Image (spheres, rainbow, N blue to C red):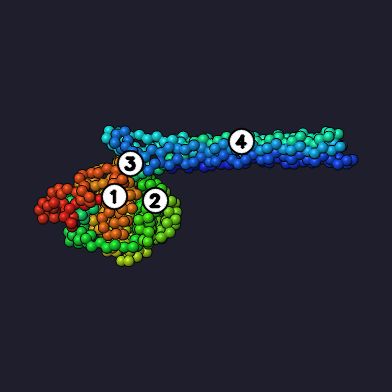
Amino acid sequence: MRRALVGCLAVAFVLFGCGGSDSEETRSATPAGSSGTGGSAGSAAGAAGTTGLPPETPVAGASGGMIVPPSGSVGGAAGATAGSAGTAGSAWATGGAAGSTGGSVGTGGAAYAGAGGASSAMGGAAGSAGAMYTGGTAGTGGGTGGTGGVSTGGTGGGATGGAAGATGGAAGVAGTGGGSVYVPTLTAGMWDDNANYNVFLNYTASQGNYANVLPLFDRATTDAARAGTTQRGAFNAIDIALVLDTTGSMADELSYLQNEFKGISSAVSAQFPTADVRWSLVVYRDAGDEYVTRGFDFTNVVSTFQTNLAAQRSNGGGDEPEAVPDAFQAALAQSWRGATAAQMLLWVADAPHHDFAVQNMRAALTSTKDKGIRIYPVAASNANPLCIATMRIGAQVTGGRYIFLTNDSGVGGGHSEPPVMCYYVTKLNDAIVRSVAMELTGKYVAPSPDAIVRVVGTPVGDTCAQPVVPDAGGGGDAPATGPDGAISAN
């Protein structure tokens, strides 16, 4: 899939007129009349159009989808009243001097290239989510002010001086058009395979088609990982590495994160104002592309990380597998703080490792686990089944949680329903903020009721009803319970 998400930019131009100049004539025989003064300049330009912003509360689409329709606001106001008239020259006995030139040009209204007027929205088709709205038409710019007239000169023997300068330019025309287009959101669910351990065992046992290329771990290793999730501690510092596939099929996800990162960071800071939060970035593609990996080490300066992220573009790829083990090794080589901070690797991708690199993939996941870094993968649009299975294995063995995009936003390619029992659908940015909160507090954090877009299954708080799931490890059928005896609905 190849797609791009286009934002809109509103640019205001202010057109300035040129002022008239004063002139004076003298006669050798007698004093001349004094010069008439010019008309004053027209007043300032009309104000630029304001940017339309969407309301905060989503509403239902025509077929059950959630939409957030904004509306563009009006353009700039008209330029104010033009310049005043010039004054007359004084009277003299012998010939008034020439009157001054006319009033200077009034400034025009601000030209406003609105990036979108009122936006439209539509519901999803046949029970699917409502599609996100699109932008309206661009506004037009304001006109320039008129030119001031020129006063006439005094006659040779006239008693009075030059006539007053003409008035200044006319007021500028108001800019039209509305505000910029709101960037569509992405929605996601979350699942904890350690809290639903029998479900995970059954899932991995069913992946026979990928048995030779999956980075599987033995039962003792996965059992130990599950036990470790009951011993989470709280921290006041966290290192978060964003490991991001930037091939051509990842345009939606890259654009979303570039637009939403500041809000994500601000939400984390608001919830944990004293926490020391550091971000790092690794982007990757594959051999033969512009680059294989490109890394930016940890920083607690949000603007630095945001600048690095904003500079990235999606391109390349072609064949489906990418250099995933290389990306993990690049991330592991960065300056993690170890046991003094929570450590989280946010892996956003839609394609798996190469078949020949399965041992390198397993080694990368092992090293991540050994360094105490928890993987929170995000399965993007049309994610490959091998990629999804690798993500769930990585999240389970490191004590993280599996995040997956859903169709609720109507953005991007298709997202298959995952084989999990129950989950909440929220915006992706909310899922990321909750993930950070869970790593800082060491506890499960439920979504707020107003953040929930859709509910799958029968969650009761942070648990689900207990379905019976076969134990693929040979222990017999058992309820799919977590360490606390219930299934976690993340």
Earlier in the chain: of badge 1 and badge 3, it is 3
| Residue indicated by mark 1 | 447
Give amino acid for label 4: Ala
Residue 276 visible to the viewer? yes
Q: In the figure, 80 relative to 208: above or below?
A: above
Q: Which disc number belongs to residue 321?
A: none
- In percent of the image, x 61 and y 35: which residue is there? 171
Earlier in the chain: of badge 1 and badge 2, it is 2
Nearer to us: label 2 or label 4: 4
| Residue indicated by mark 2 | 263
Mark 4 neighbour class, 10 Å CA radius: few under 14, some 14 to 19, many 20 or more: many
Q: Position of residue 280 (x, y in %)?
A: 38, 58
Secondary structure of the residue carrying tag 1 is loop
Give amino acid for label 3: Ser
Question: Is residue 478 or residue 164 the one in the foreground?
Answer: 164
| Residue indicated by mark 3 | 409
Nearer to us: label 2 or label 3: 2
Q: Position of residue 406 (x, y in %)?
A: 29, 44
Give amino acid for label 2: Gly
Q: How far apart in space, not on screen, are marks 3 and 4 (Cα)? A: 45 Å
* Circles 1, 4 touching at the beta carbon (< 8 Å): no
* Circles 2, 3 touching at the beta carbon (< 8 Å): no
Determine the residue located farthest toward the right in the rendered image. Answer: 29
Nearer to us: label 3 or label 4: 4
Give amino acid for label 1: Pro
Residue 405 visible to the viewer? no
